[in-house]
Image: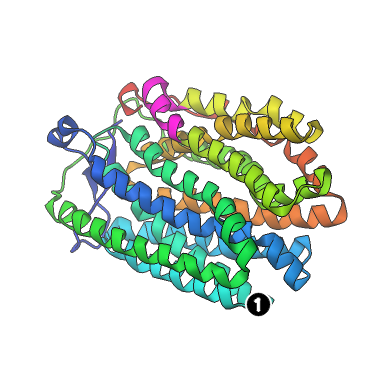
């Protein structure tokens, strides 16, 4: 099974399967400057996104919100990203948009400004949705750029891309603790400068991307004789979505409510709890980086098996651990469970290579949508029971990793 992606010329109106990396490009290796730029942009993008969850305690206290309303803020943010990412990916499969990343980042820019000045719950929801819109535009096309710059090392490129986003997510709580908590909601506007920097970088990457599109020539690509049937591909995609569900919902439960869990159970301050959240999210970044190269070397299926099921003993122990033991367990869980993200995404891309943008959008969108819907449901459950009960339930989510048994074996040279 070859590793093509859809990278049509701008004049095309229908998707055409193209070889995404020429032998010369593979020999030259990855375009490290481009990978570094797109990863850093991912870092900036997800830093701004993670601010939303990090300021929940401030919004909750200021506007007397309950956990269900907190979950709805996450849902508003994640829903726009989930709904629009596959649409964006489908459109860019037909006609690539090299400057769409910079334009989409402008939505995040205005969303942050609106969030800093919002005094009504409805306005907070709109601001969160605008930040989610920026994410919807960013992820499908930036994932395509990372693959084009990979030099054939697809798992490595995806991990470098994911690394930036994971570290960006982990920085949100720290910046909130250092800036937003002391200076209040209005200080969120300061982070719009990060969005402006991201716009400049993404515009420059768009200039690199544009000739890559124009230089592409149509190449007929035949399916590998050992490639799975269309029926098995459909089943595999459903399994991958279920696996991403188990991973993302668990991570969402910690990202959205870990601060409240630590405050309620151990009586720590908001700033201290945000530091503990940073530790967990930083561990996620480490795991996300190593998962892709391991998938390139040993096969993505085995990495998916180990990374999801391997976290189960530690997630089951977390609700019963003390404060410091919880920190240690959160690090172990974060490293193990996040190592599967790159392998799941690249596995899906290789199953349906002629719909690269749409598949990337669906899987990034599903990840966001699951996180948002799960946060809303878990918030409602926490209101009726307790935060501790929520974590006892979520501890069993990695068991869904058993579904990996239904994933097909891809031809060797697609790993």
Q: Nearer the viewer, residue 61 or 10?
A: 61
Up/down of 254 relative to 411, above or below: below
Instruction: Please state if 293 lies on the left or on the right of 205 as rendered.
Output: right
Instruction: Please state if 76 lies on the left or on the right of 106 as rendered.
Output: right
Looking at the rendered structure, the number of numbered marks drawn on it comes to: 1
Q: Is residue 351 visible?
A: no
Instruction: Please state if 9 lies on the left or on the right of 45 as rendered.
Output: left
**Segment colored magenta:** 289-300
Q: Position of residue 391 (x, y in %)?
A: 76, 41
Q: Nearer the viewer, residue 53 or 361?
A: 53
Up/down of 184 relative to 164, above or below: below
Q: Nearer the viewer, residue 387 or 140?
A: 387
Callout 1 secondary element: helix
Up/down of 284 relative to 415, above or below: below
Which residue is found at the position 37% from the left and 33% from the top? 155
| Circle 1 Cα neighbour tier, 10 Å, few/some/many (<14 / 14–19 / ≥20) | few
Q: Position of residue 82 (x, y in %)?
A: 52, 58
- The image quadrant where one finds the N terminus is top left
Colour scheme shown: rainbow
Q: Position of residue 210 (x, y in %)?
A: 19, 58
Instruction: Please state if 374 lies on the left or on the right of 147 as rendered.
Output: right
- The image quadrant where one finds the C terminus is top left
Which residue is found at the position 46% from the left and 74% from the top? 110
Q: Is residue 163 visible?
A: yes
Residue 297 shown in magenta = yes
Residue 13: which quarter of the image?
A: bottom left
Q: Position of residue 223 (x, y in %)?
A: 28, 34
Which residue lies under the disc numbered 1? 122
Residue 285 shown in magenta = no
Magenta: main secondary structure = helix
Which residue is found at the position 69% from the left and 47% from the top? 272
Which residue is found at the position 54% from the left and 47% from the top? 170
């Amino acid at each position: 099974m070859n590793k093509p992606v859809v990278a049509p010329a701008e004049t095309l109106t229908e998707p055409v399967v193209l070889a995404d990396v020429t032998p010369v490009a593979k020999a030259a290796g990855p375009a490290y400057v481009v990978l570094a730029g797109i990863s850093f942009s991912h870092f900036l993008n997800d830093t701004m996104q993670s601010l939303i969850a990090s300021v929940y305690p401030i919004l909750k206290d200021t506007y007397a919100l309950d956990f269900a309303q907190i979950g709805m803020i996450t849902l508003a943010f994640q829903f726009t990203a989930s709904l629009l990412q596959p649409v964006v990916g489908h459109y860019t499969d037909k006609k690539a948009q090299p400057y769409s990343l910079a334009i989409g980042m402008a939505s995040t820019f205005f969303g942050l400004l609106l969030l800093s000045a919002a005094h009504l719950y409805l306005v907070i929801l709109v601001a969160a949705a605008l930040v989610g819109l920026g994410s919807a535009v960013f992820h499908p096309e930036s994932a395509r750029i990372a693959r084009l710059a990979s030099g054939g090392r697809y798992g490595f490129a995806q991990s470098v891309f994911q690394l930036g986003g994971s570290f960006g997510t982990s920085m949100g709580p720290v910046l909130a603790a250092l800036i937003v908590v002391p200076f209040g909601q209005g200080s969120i506007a300061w982070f719009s400068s990060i969005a402006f920097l991201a716009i400049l970088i993404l515009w420059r990457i768009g200039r690199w991307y544009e000739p890559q599109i124009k230089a592409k020539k149509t190449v007929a690509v035949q399916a590998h004789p050992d490639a799975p049937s269309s029926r098995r591909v459909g089943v595999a995609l459903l399994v991958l979505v279920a696996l991403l569900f188990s991973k993302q919902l668990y991570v969402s439960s910690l990202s959205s409510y870990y601060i409240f869990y630590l405050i309620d159970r151990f009586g720590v301050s908001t700033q201290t709890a945000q530091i503990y959240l940073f530790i967990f999210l930083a561990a996620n970044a480490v795991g996300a980086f190593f998962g892709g190269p391991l998938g390139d070397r040993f096969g993505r299926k085995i990495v998916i098996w180990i990374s999801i099921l391997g976290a189960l003993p530690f997630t089951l122990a977390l609700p019963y651990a003390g404060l410091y033991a919880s920190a240690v367990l959160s690090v172990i869980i974060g490293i193990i469970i996040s190592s599967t993200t790159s392998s799941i995404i690249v596995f899906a891309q290789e199953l349906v290579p002629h719909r690269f943008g749409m598949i990337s959008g669906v899987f990034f969108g599903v990840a966001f949508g699951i996180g948002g819907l799960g946060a809303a449901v878990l918030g409602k459950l926490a209101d009726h029971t307790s935060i501790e009960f929520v974590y006892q339930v979520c501890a069993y989510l990695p068991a869904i990793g058993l579904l990996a048994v239904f994933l097909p074996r891809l031809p060797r040279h697609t790993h």
